[in-house]
Image (cartoon, rainbow, N blue to C red):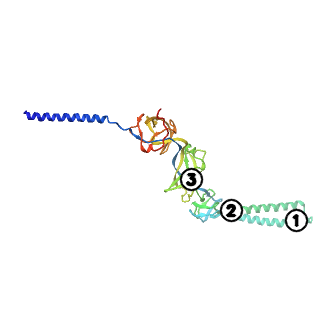
Amino acid sequence: MNKKTKVIIGGFVIVVVAALLLTRFISKDESYAEISPPEVTVASPQIGTIELTSSLIGTVEPAEFVSVSPEIAGEVSEVMIQAGDRISAGQTICRIDNTQVDSTQISMESAEVSLEDAKKNFARIEVLYAEGGISEQSYEDAKSGLKRAQLQYDSAKLSYSNQAKYSVVTSPISGIVESCDVERYDVVSPQTVLCVVAGGEEKVISFNVTERVLEKLDVGSQVKIEKNGTDYTGTITETSSMVDASTGLFKVKASIKSGTALASGTSAKLFVLSDKVENVLTIPVDAVYYDDGKPFVYTYKDKMAHKVFVEVGICDESNIEVVSGLNSKDSIIVSWSSELYDEAAVILDKEASDTPMPETNEKE
């Protein structure tokens, strides 16, 4: 190796060593650079109310409805209504041909003839009795016969009147015919449901709830109802105190305001209050962390974050109930930072520092 080559190599080594030393000193300076504490936002616990709702499915029903059945058996001779018709109380639904009508009419006419004969006989006996031509016993027998004839006629007339009346079936209420299950020539009996009439414009929704939810519902409470993209307001009118053995649930009914557009028998989605707490301490739900399943928050005091375990209750999408561990004077760190830990140094961000905060004792 010549002298010139040795000089070049020596110079290269010097440059490499110098670069290594420079990098070390720079890294050392950077490692000693001060890391700025994280900025945090704080808020105070508030006294408020938290409500939870449950989504249920209910069935729309008319507020008042009657099932119409005939009083007599027979063949339907004429039907005057169909489903969807609006009818009035007393309006004819159908007519029924019944042999009993003719039979009772004959009995009535026969009783009427007997009554006329009894009247004529009594009039003759009465004259004879006044003249002393017959005994008092004969007079009393004729009088009793007239009375019996009158009672028989009255009974036959009432029977005929009822049969004639029952052959024409009318609606007991005004409303809308929800269903009509009778046609001409059908043979019906008192056990046959001819139609269902829903009275009035009001609708109700019937639904089932658990015992826990039932405890939160009161008559007069409101529920929200959704159907085909339209919202309705319902008011609870009935709460059952007896559980349904088949479902293990309790039945509840709510009247629907302006629900005429809802078809009876259809299903609708509704929301009811399932839990509620009032006048409780609340904080933002995002401010709560969990350590091995135990909830805790970070409080701000003396320019430091402090880890505080708390007992929490119910929560909604925004807030959570604090049962114990905090009071309304605490400052809760509500912003997230990966640099938060117990007794970590923190500073308030500008927005938070402009907001009046609860007083803290910096000297403690």
Dot 3: within a 10 Å radius of its alpha carbon, few (fewer than 14), some, or many (20 or more) residues? many
Between 150 and 233, the one lying in front of the other is: 233
Give the residue at mark 1: 126
Please report the residue visible at 60 percent of the width from the left and 55 percent of the height from the top: 63
Which of the 4 image quarters holds residue 204?
A: bottom right
Query: Where does the image place residue 294, in percent across and percent down from the top left?
Result: 46, 35
Compute the Cα span from label 1 to label 2. 37 Å
| Circle nearer the N terminus (1, 3) | 1
Query: Where does the image place residue 193, in percent across and percent down from the top left?
Result: 60, 57
- The answer to whether one can see residue 283 in this image is yes
Between 305 and 60, the one lying in front of the other is: 305
Dot 1: within a 10 Å radius of its alpha carbon, few (fewer than 14), some, or many (20 or more) residues? some
As drawn, is 220 to the left or to the right of 344? right
Please report the residue visible at 43 percent of the width from the left and 45 percent of the height from the top: 351
Dot 2: within a 10 Å radius of its alpha carbon, few (fewer than 14), some, or many (20 or more) residues? many
- Please name the amino acid that badge 2 sits on: Gln
Compute the Cα span from label 1 to label 3. 75 Å
Give the residue at mark 2: 163
Q: Secondary structure at mark 3?
A: strand
Task: Pick the quarter of the image with the N terminus.
Answer: top left
Which of the 4 image quarters holds residue 259?
A: bottom right
| Label of residue 234 in the image | 3
- Please name the amino acid that badge 1 sits on: Glu
Between 154 and 308, the one lying in front of the other is: 308
Which of the 4 image quarters holds residue 172?
A: bottom right
As drawn, is 364 to the left or to the right of 103? left
Query: Where does the image place residue 251, in percent across and percent down from the top left?
Result: 57, 48
| Circle nearer the N terminus (1, 2) | 1
| Circle nearer the N terminus (2, 3) | 2
- Please name the amino acid that badge 3 sits on: Gly
